[in-house]
Amino acid sequence: MKTFSGKILGKLGWKIKGDFPNIKKSVTIFAPHTAHIDAIYGKLGFTELGVKYKFLSKKELFFFPMNLVMKKFGSIPVRGVKNKNAIYQVVDLFNDADELHIVVSPEGWIKRVTKWNKGFYYMASKAKVPIVVAYLDYKEKTMGVKGVIYDTDDFKTVMQQINTLYNDVTGKCPEQFALQEIE
């Protein structure tokens, strides 16, 4: 039986492919993120998949009354502070939780970037949790999980795997999505 979220997605023509992996903790990347509406579809999709998740947002978005909406939506405020940036905040959250999936937009922006924010990688690596590669494909109107990366020892290897998984995915604004440039 579909949840209310699943019924909404279905009425909008979206399908969910696959199941979320049976793991207790992960950094889940969700891409492409080329339009603000992606967050709504993501929320509906992760709810339908039954994922207990939180996502990160700039602390500046947490002003009244927006802070109430952001918290209800599952957002955690983060900002860069010397010796206590978002990476360490997330590692602490993982250490304190029995089950937690942190959802991150790896590009870091809604605009086209070829150098993704490496924070998601460092969060997973330092917390010793896998990276779940989730997607939203507007061309196929599907969302789901492309794969799970358990070995996070080498950034370049992880990014090559991620690029392969996202290679055939189309964002709402395809011209605004680029894979990570591998150096």
Image (cartoon, helix red, strand yellow):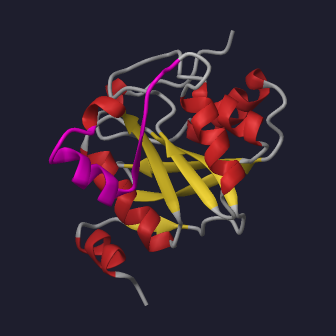
Q: Residue at x 38, y 38 (%)?
A: 57
* Residue 36 horizontal side relative to residue 127, left or right: left
Q: Residue at x 46, y 63 (%)?
A: 46
Q: Which residue is situated farthest in the bottom direction here? A: 1
Q: Quadrant of residue 36?
A: top left
User: Which range of residues does the magenta coloring cover?
Assistant: 62-81
Q: Which residue is situated farthest in the top direction here? A: 183
* Residue 145 horizontal side relative to residue 131, left or right: left
**The N terminus appears in which quarter of the rendering?**
bottom left
**The C terminus appears in which quarter of the rendering?**
top right
Res 147 visible: no
As for residue 74 lying within the magenta part, the answer is yes
Residue 129, position as x, y percentages in the image: 75, 47
Residue 64, position as x, y percentages in the image: 16, 44
As for residue 104 lying within the magenta part, the answer is no
* Residue 157 horizontal side relative to residue 75, left or right: right
Q: How many marks?
A: 0
Q: Residue at x 19, y 46 (%)?
A: 66
Residue 24, position as x, y percentages in the image: 70, 64
Residue 157, position as x, y percentages in the image: 78, 27
* Residue 179 horizontal side relative to residue 57, left or right: right
